[in-house]
Amino acid sequence: MADYFLNNILLVYFFYGLSFFSMGLAVFMEAGHSSRLYFARALLPLSLFGIIHGSHEWLEMFLIISSRSNAAAPPIWLSVLRISTLAVSFFLLLQFGLLLIAGRSAKRTLQLALGFAALIYASGLTLLAWRAPDMQTAFVWADIYTRYSLAIPGAAITAWGLILQRRQFKGEGMHRFGNDLLVAAIAFAFYGGIGQLFVSPSGIIPLHAINAEAFMRWVGFPIQVFRASMAAVVAIAIIHSLRVFEEENKRRINELSNAQQAEKIRLDYLRNELFHRTIRAQEDERKRIARELHDETGQTLTAIGMGLKGIIDAIDRDPERATRQTIQLQRLTNSGLDELRGIVSGLHPPQLDDLGLVAAIRSLTSEVQQRYNLPVKVINQLDNLDIPADIRLVLYRIVQEAINNVIRHAHARQVTILLTKTDQQIIINIDDDGEGFDTDLVLRGGPEYQCLGIMGMMERASSVGGKCQVISLPGRGTKVMVEVDLPAERKENERDSSLVSR
């Protein structure tokens, strides 16, 4: 068996390098993956280890081929390159293991540990190069020192780190991927504890007895076969463990889907509740109108009717009395008209159609100031803009609802309404200095939170292709921002007017 592997040692090096190189490429594709698992953030050093160490084994294969065809020693630069790639790859493996162990914290400690390891390695390598009797011996010693000072600790720390990550995988309910990490940890432990322990023969104690030649005598195949086998196990286990990110993505998609479904249910509930409350409000409004018409306008009309009958009876017998009754009826009629105007204004402000949006808002704010002693400042920058009736009504109702919310909930000292426009939009900002509230809690907290007024404003804005946004923080007041696109016809007219003015 030993002769078979020695005769095919190039294939061993090829597959040894291929195992780590393919693992490095696969891991590199997943490095930096967006994940809750810290494992994803530590993959870059592992990917670089696999690529560089696989390249090192192929370089070893090239040197063997070169030595068979040329008896002369390889160039010094090539030997330096081999030792450099070996050291860099195992330093990256050490970094990967430390990252897994340190996790999200102790970044400073991690940097110090890596710096200390690099300092120790560089110092030891310098001392060995100074004590070596010749260049060839120096490279042999450098190879041994690299494996003992970097490879064995790096593999051991990586095995420990993978076991720690396995616990996190299990905590996330991903047991089968945690088992992959356990297999990789065991393989790394054997790869470092045995594969890097048996090195090239040297006169240094105990390497005269524990070396690669002794390993082949004891087990019947070269140490490179063992290293290649462990590399293959590590590669398969690590690559298979990368499927954890696919599983995590599936879970995220399910979580988002469930959240969207829950949000849809909540919005459907709010819409239904808003619809039912709208129906109830309409019925209550009908009852109020009927009651006011019966109690006020109806009684006024009845009194006018009775007064007219009295005038008919008294017009011939007592003309003076008929005149007095006529004057009283005139006053009663004026009073009835005022009552009727109040009812009509409550249903639909006549200023909105006769004088426009700004006048209707000013009339509303004037009534609020008189009734509730709440100062409301209106800043108009619309420049007598001709707004379509449907948009006028929507904007008025949103302003009305926003002011009602301030009166009911905000305990504000002042409200400011700013009406502006751009070339594309009409914009209304309603600011108050009241108590404010947590918008996320109210809008996303569930059906128990009363946000139907806000939902109604948003629904009204969307009905004319606009949007309504509410920004608030506890103790910081509330801002309601409404943006509605200008009709295309209106935009074109304004553009033409601008060209004419130029």
Image: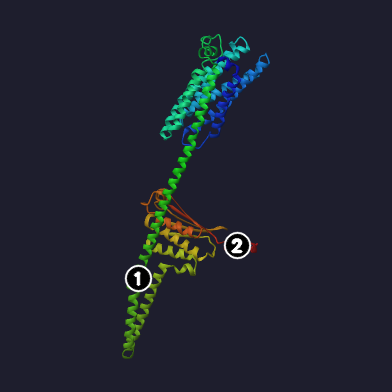
Q: Residues within 10 Å of mark 1 (few under 14, many from 20)?
A: some
Image quadrant of residue 135?
A: top right
| Residue type pointed to by label 1 | Ala
Image quadrant of residue 126?
A: top right
Quadrant for the N terminus, please.
top right
Q: Is residue 415 visible?
A: yes
| Disc marking residue 42 | none
Q: Residues within 10 Å of mark 2 (few under 14, many from 20)?
A: few
Q: Identify the residue shown where x is 35% and y is 72%.
A: 293
Percent across and percent down for residue 212 are 54, 14
Image quadrant of residue 12?
A: top right
| Residue type pointed to by label 2 | Glu
| Closest to the observer, 424 or 415 | 424
Percent across and percent down for residue 303 are 32, 79
User: Separation of disc 2 and disc 1 at Cα?
Assistant: 46 Å
| Disc marking residue 290 | 1
**In the displayed structure image, the side of residue 449 where residue 106 appears, left or right:** right
Quadrant for the C terminus, please.
bottom right
Q: Is residue 364 above or below residue 48?
A: below
Residue under pointer 2: 492
Percent across and percent down for residue 315 are 34, 89
Residue contact between numbered discs 2 and 1, judged by CB atoms under 8 Å: no
